[in-house]
Amino acid sequence: MTRSVLVTGGNRGLGLAIARAFAAEGDAVAVTHRGGGAPPGLLGVKCDVTDPDQIARAFQEVRQEQGPVEVLVSNAGITRDALLLRMREEMFAEVIDTNLTGAYRVAKAAVNDMIRMRRGRMIFISSVTGLKGVAGQANYAASKAGLIGLARSLARELAPRGVTANVVAPGLLDTDMTSDLSDGYKERILAEVPLGRTATLDEVAGAAVWLASPSAAAVTGQVITVDGGGSLGH
Ligand code: NDP
């Protein structure tokens, strides 16, 4: 059955890999963008997740074009890295507003339709940084750990309505977000990864597709790490 899927930040990076993986399943897939448009084959909706009005308009457009959102992948995210001594309050606030409050906003925009349909899957893209912590990423780690509390609470709240809420926590990925990291830094991270490599974008996308599949119907409030085992034990 074709489902209506929305991936925030699905215009590039991990979000695009997730959007394409759902499209390959035969789903109707919409992605948000902030003005740059969407790649071919995906419905692009202009939406900044820090703006509730844009979110409302985007959900309305998705509803009209491909039906109410049944699978929401909250993926949009940013980093503003600095050690605490140099982390200005706006750097902290901007990351929380985008990564955590943005996820709350899109979940809230999706929930009415999901409750009415008595089915829905919410998938929040966190990070192993939210589990382990990383020096220089206090804002990002707090936002990503916050998503786990958000998803677990929604899992309890929405279970009676047939809606699940889960988290995918990737390790280091090869996207624009990490393109500035030095090879030495990446090598130090990899040295602690049991499988000797982190995941591909497609492998992370596979976890999201599975969480939205019928075989994951009994899985809710869970954190699936996809990181080569690097966060094992956390
Ligand atoms: P990219 O920087 O490649 O892409 C970020 C995406 O988020 C873009 O589509 C961007 O849109 C969108 N975005 C950012 N801010 C907003 C906003 N205010 N409103 C709407 N969309 C926004 O990052 P990745 O693909 O690497 O990251 C995707 C997710 O995966 C993030 O949540 C990230 O934290 C998480 N993650 C990434 C890891 C990595 O190593 N890369 C590891 C673990 C988790 P636009 O094109 O308009 O800028």
Image: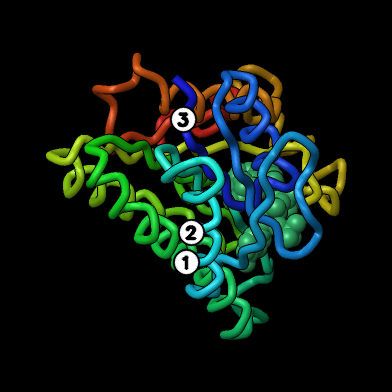
Nearest to the observer: residue 105 or residue 119: 119
Residue bearing mark 3 = 3
Residue bearing mark 2 = 60
Give the image location of residue 181, x and y in percent: 82, 50
Q: Secondary structure at mark 1?
A: helix
Q: Mark 1 and mark 3: span between their CA atoms? A: 20 Å
Left or right of 230, for residue 146: left
Farthest bottom residue in view: 89
Residue bearing mark 1 = 56
Give the image location of residue 29, x and y in percent: 59, 37
Mark 3 CB in 8 Å range of ligand 1?
no
Q: Mark 3 and mark 2: span between their CA atoms? A: 16 Å
Q: Is residue 139 visible?
A: no
Nearest to the observer: residue 39 or residue 186: 39
Give the image location of residue 179, x and y in percent: 84, 48
Q: Secondary structure at mark 3?
A: loop
**Residue 83, placed above or below residue 58:** below
